[in-house]
Image: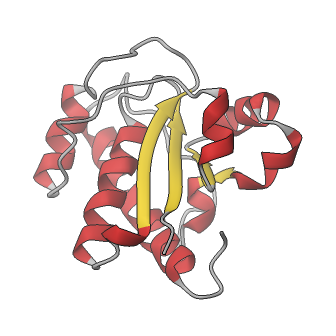
Amino acid sequence: MLKKKVLFVCTGNICRSPTAEGVARGMARSLGLEDRFHFESAGTHGYHVGEAPDPRTVRVARARGYDLSAQRARRVSEFDFLSFDHVLAMGRDHLDWLRRACPREHQGKLRLLLEFSDGDLAGEVPDPYYGGMDGFEQVVDLVENAVAEMLKELSAPQGRT
């Protein structure tokens, strides 16, 4: 069975998208689905290429049981649109950026992560970078909800490929 490849995208790849990657890996593992998925994250901008996720992100994720320690920031590349089955943006600005960068034949792979959410109608994972720890907690809450729904949808026989 081929693994479904999912890329999570935010701005600098140090807060929201690494959280989504770590949550997705952890949840897939706990559900026995890790052999069915491959997860990565990237940023629309190269501000932090090669850096570890923000220490606040790491701390909040660790407290919830997710390990982000091996992750390093990278920028979205043209190859990502070819190699990933799903490219999930944290916010509308990221989705707009991805739509401009993505070849027409791969546009169907793009969507907001929170489109999978069963509770957030705003559709965006807010950037916690300039706020307090409660913002990082909120990111994990939103991401956990959306990733749980994403795993259900994408692992179902009729799930999007």
Q: Residue furthest bottom?
A: 157
| Coloring applied to the structure | secondary structure
The answer to whether 107 is drawn above or below residue 54 in the figure is below
- Decide if residue 43 is in sight here: yes
Tell me residue 31's x, y (percent). Answer: 29, 79
Q: Quadrant of residue 148?
A: bottom left
**142 displayed left or right of 112:** left
Q: Residue furthest right?
A: 104
Q: Quadrant of residue 89?
A: top right
Q: Which residue is at a point 52% across and 46% down the rendered structure image?
A: 7
**Residue 71 percent location from the top left of the image:** 27, 34
Q: Is residue 5 above or below residue 99?
A: below
- Foreground pick, 64 / 81: 81
User: How far across and down, in percent of the image, does residue 64 sit?
Assistant: 17, 57
In-front residue for pair 140/2: 2
Quadrant showing the C terminus: bottom right
Q: Is 122 left or right of 50, judged from the image as shown?
A: right
Q: Is residue 123 visible?
A: no
Tell me residue 111's x, y (percent).
Answer: 68, 53
Q: Residue at x 14, y 39 (%)?
A: 59
**Residue in the picture at 57% in, 28% down:** 76
Instruction: Please name the residue shown 55% across and 62% down the image.
Output: 120
Q: Which residue is at the front of the view, 139 or 106?
A: 106
Q: Looking at this view, name the residue that lies furthest to the top.
A: 47
**Measured along the vertical axis of the image, is residue 37 above or below residue 99?**
below
